[in-house]
Amino acid sequence: MNLELFIAKKIHFSKDGDRKVTSPAVRIAMIGLALGLGVMILSVAIVVGFKKEVRNKVIGFGSHIQITNFDSNSSYESTPIAVNDSLKEALRVWPGVKHIEVFATKPGIVKTDAEFQGVIFKGIDTDFDWTFFRNNLKEGELFTVDPDKNSTEVLVSRYLCDLLGLKVGDNLFAYFVQEDVRARRFHISGIYETGFLDYDKLFILTDIRQIRRLNGWEADQCSGIELLVHDYDQLDQITEALYFDMAEKQDRNGNTFYTRSVKELNPMIFSWLEVLDVNVVVILILMMAVAGFTMISGLLIIILERTNMIGILKAMGQNNVSIRKVFLYVSFFLIGKGMVWGNLVGILICLIQSYFRVFTLDPSTYYLDAVPIDLSLTSLLLINLGTLAAAMLMMLGPTYLITKIDPVRSIRFE
């Protein structure tokens, strides 16, 4: 029989099942732990969700990896590369690669009678993965790229449609500044909205053949190749391997290939997202410290309330280690109750926000229209295990007070 656990249960539970530990200070300590754990769960869920949502939107507009001409500058007026079927097949079977597609970009100006706006036309081919834009399609439909003819249909963002006063089914007039200004008429087949305004106000999707005609490119030429990978965590390794492999190759015109990941193409955004990890660590440390100190105060009160019992146990022959175990068990019960309530509060708020999107955001500032939530079972277990371990370690200090209690004086203590 575990005597320490038996005594701890007697302290914590009465015979009729009611809580014996009912001191207001102890209840406040448990509430503090519950709130601290709830905040930690929310912080991790929000930051992980925010990073994933923003990252997925950047990837949706530009894929995980891009292979372009080494001579291309940072503008969207790109130098073409020639892509043959053998190169596509080699990339398609590359370890870790899920999908490949070619693309072409062309800066232009969209004009109506009242407004005009500078945009980027992104030309796509029959191999384009529509998943991202299908999930963000708000009106109309996605257009079909026909390999046998040029399509004049385009997919435009809601931001541009509202700015220019356009809607599904309208014609859109674009002007391209080259050696001579060229004008093209397009037909709006659908409207998308991602909430990522930096890109929503910039990109219009069209048939890649339109870009090739404007630039005078041949049928196998494009601005680059986009690749999607299976596992984002392997992105850096796949990019590095591809970089050195593609650097040794040239297209039929002698152009060298340049491989970059989405992190390299958007360093400011991904550096900003990495800073968020520091914020989470700070929040976790602060909340754990607050919860730990409240539990320390609660345990000290319990020890003071049980000074008489401690003296009796010592007089009966119990050593300090055994008595300290008793109060560590009591601490475990209190911490467990606080963690149960903390999990309930944290998970409930996460579920409410995930399904009902109660807390909204300004997309122009945060790139999202609502606070995102992404809470995995692994994260939840790690938070709970870390909180339990840290709280129990912090409880070792207060129990040292038991070694200083004199049994003779404490038995007379009330």
Image (spheres, rainbow, N blue to C red):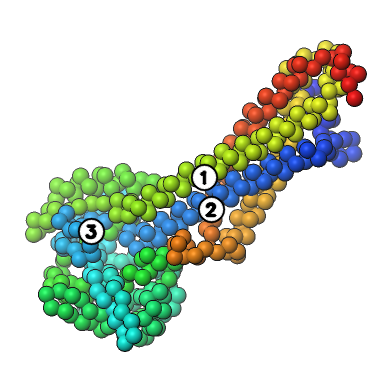
The amino acid sitting under disc 2 is Ile
Q: Which residue is mark 1?
A: 280
**Percent x, y for residue 82?**
15, 62
Q: How many marks?
A: 3
Q: Residue at x 47, y 45 (%)?
A: 277
Can you say whether 390 is above or below 202 in the image?
above
What mark, if any, has residue 46 been given in the picture?
2
Circle 1 Cα neighbour tier, 10 Å, few/some/many (<14 / 14–19 / ≥20): some
What mark, if any, has residue 74 been given in the picture?
3
Q: Earlier in the sequence, mark 1 or mark 2?
A: 2
Foreground: disc 1 or disc 2: 1
**Percent x, y for residue 74?**
23, 58
Circle 3 Cα neighbour tier, 10 Å, few/some/many (<14 / 14–19 / ≥20): few
- Helix, strand or loop for disc 2: helix
- Looking at this view, is 19 or 164 the one in front? 164
**Percent x, y for residue 213?**
16, 75
